[in-house]
Amino acid sequence: MRVVIIGSTGQLGTDLTKALSGAHDVTGLSHQSIEVSDYNSCLILKQHRPDVVVNTAAFHKTDQCEEEPMKAFSVNALGARNVAAVCREIGALNIYVSTDYVFDGSKNRPYTENDVPAPVNTYGVSKLAGEFFTRQNTRHYVVRVASLFGAAGSSGKGGNFVETMITRAVKKEPINVVDDIWMSPTYTKDAASTIGNMILAKLPYGVYHAANKGYCTWFEFAEEILKLASLEASLKPTKTSQSPGKANRPRFSGLKSTKLQKYGLPTRGWKEALLDYLLEKGHLKQEHG
């Protein structure tokens, strides 16, 4: 099949390009090639005549979204609408990458695909709007991921949480990490593989959670990173109230997929995924059994 990946140079887009290239004819479109918030720019999709379009484009700096809500909605919502409209015209399967931030965090246990979204910040609202626009095209997958880490690093944020922890530990800097926000760390290589398997398996259209299995606090995530990388650091837990951002954040946004399990595509645990990431990046001093 012909697959177009929007945002192909990003953290997830890079791994999607690698994961899908073996089985499909893949074209990557970077931000320089397509501006999703401009419908006319999205018409470039027609030139490639894709069977599948994966839209990873996002304005995801959560605090900045509070300051620039118009930008957040133009990329995350209007952009999704434009891509969905072109996909509907050409009959392409439209895959929209969404987020755990569509939930409010009050459930206190992992959210499944059946839970009702109720975002508590501008980023989450804009992504939920993008989900609704994507669903205007019957042939769609909305794929929710969370707390991404991948070899390419985040273009919008620079690096990722794993790299930040390792860099600070190596520099012997004190590290304070919140221990009152729970989430599901997601290795982009695994999320990309899941999306590739969904396409090949021709799963029913709809919403899917593709985060790695399990959940932890950011502090627990940092502890595991340093432990696996055999690094000692002055790591201390802190509370969200001690360093509040402009955006509210869901206290518990762990994700669980009941649907992928049902269709024989279960996700693996985040600790196993983290170990593979550290191996991929060459951070491990010795082989782990």
Image (cartoon, grey):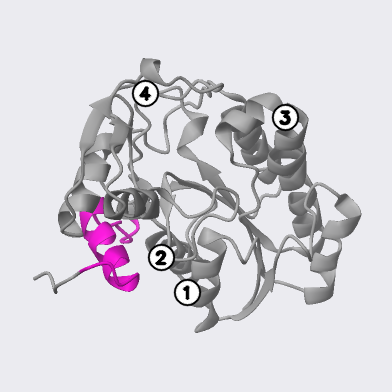
Q: Quadrant of residue 190?
A: bottom left
- N-term mark: 1 or 4: 1
Spatial CA distance of label 4 from label 3 is 23 Å
- N-term mark: 3 or 2: 3
Q: Which disc is residue 68 wearing?
A: 3
Q: Which disc is residue 251 wearing?
A: 4
Q: Which amino acid does label 4 sit on?
A: Arg
**Front residue (pair 157, 255):** 157
Residue at 74% across / 51% down in the picture? 84
Q: Where is residue 229 in the image (x, y as percent from the top left)?
A: 20, 60
Q: Which disc is residue 19 wearing?
A: 1
Q: Name the residue under label 2.
A: 189
Q: Give the range drawn in magenta.
A: 263-284
Is 38 placed above or below 263 here?
above
Q: What residue type is labelled 2?
A: Lys
Circle nearer the viewer, 1 or 4: 4
The secondary structure type at the circle numbered 2 is helix
**Crowd tier of the residue under label 1, counting other residues whose Cα lies within 10 Å: few below 14, some 14–19, many 20 or above:** many
- N-term mark: 4 or 3: 3
Is residue 185 part of the magenta span, yes or no? no
Circle nearer the viewer, 1 or 3: 3
- N-term mark: 1 or 3: 1
Circle nearer the viewer, 3 or 2: 3
Residue 210 visible to an observer of this rendering = no
Q: Do the CB atoms of the residues marked 2 and 4 lie less than 8 Å apart?
A: no
Q: In this view, does 272 lie to the left or right of 19?
A: left
